[in-house]
Amino acid sequence: MTQEYRHIPVLLNECRDALNLKDGSVYLDCTLGGAGHSVEMARHIAPGGTLIGIDQDDMALEAAAKRLAEVGLDSAPILLKGNFGQLDDLLVEARVPGIDAVLFDLGVSSPQFDIPERGFSYREDAPLDMRMDPGKHTLTAAEILNTYTEADLTRVLREYGEEKWAARIASFVCDARRERPVQTTLEFVEIIKKAIPASARKSGGHPAKRSFQALRIEVNHEMDVLRSGLDAAIRWLRPGGRIAVIAYHSLEDRIVKETFRTMENPCTCPPEFPVCVCGKKPVLKVNTRKPIIPSEREIEKNKRAHSARLRVATKL
């Protein structure tokens, strides 16, 4: 864990412009990482602004603290350990009265991919872990592969990885674990390669990519955490405040889009009703009817930006 925490911020200028930051703004970074985004945002809320950063990775918090120490804010950044699913408790504990801008960058950070022992990478041999916060989470990817039923494994791979060969991969995993437990990343990669026909492996990138994504989401309950985090962040926004969310796969982007759409038009009255009688009022105005995507130039510089989608909304 001595590797320097690196974070190349995706859609940095677009996020800065979308959040409409000013001197004195209270800015919340729900996925602080190495503070790649927050360093830039701090310059636009300085000197009187307040920067709050949340991350569940100790290495990220340590790296962010060093980078943010010299950004010119009058008050020290408030760095909180946890994940955005705990947003209400974290902000209450920090005695934050409200926020003016909030950013979610939902991509898994580079070090978590690059450090083999974290178990996120399908290119390095390591224990099948994938826990974002090993100190709090007990369920590992290995436990999922070795204890879930074949039906549950199929569900996870299909729902969270959008894997066409989910049922076949689950069947091959169950066959393999009857001989011995599946314990390492490359053991799982070999099972996936055996399960997916050779002709289907010729396109679409690495054959293990979708299955590893699915396991990571299941281990960390990412979809449930995202829903609760978005709801909490929107509650804490002051009127006129903005929320920006960068998603990297269709599952995340769909949740963000549906959350924004529902909060912009929460009415549950039947379409045939001439006027609204449910009493539900709009909470947001959606600024991005279509997501903002990276330029070709940015993708050339940072390959991990290629699937990024940015959506923005304003609190009414």
Image (cartoon, helix red, strand yellow):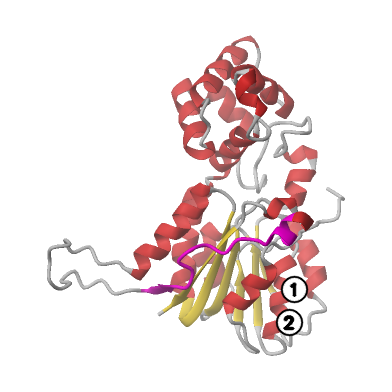
Quadrant where the image shows the C terminus: bottom left
Foreground: 67 or 11?
A: 11
Q: Which residues are magenta?
A: 283-299
Vertical placement of 5 versus 141: above or below? below
State the residue at coordinates (74%, 56%). 58
Q: Is residue 126 left or right of residue 158?
A: right
Of 241 and 182, which appears nearest the observer? 241
Three-letter residue code for mark 2: Arg
111 sits left or right of 266 in the view: right
Residue 103 pos. (x, y %) = 59, 68
Classify residue 21 by image quadrant: bottom right
Q: Which mark is residue 39?
A: 1
Report the amino acid beneath label 1. Answer: Val
**What residue is disc 2 on?**
43
Q: Residue at x 12, y 71 (%)?
A: 274
Q: Residue furthest front?
A: 296
Is residue 178 placed above or below 65 in the rendered structure? above
The picture places residue 150, in percent across and down from the top left corner, at: 48, 21
Is residue 253 rendered to the left or right of residue 47?
left
Which of these two is toward me, 193 or 176? Answer: 193
Residue at (56% x, 22% y) in the render: 169
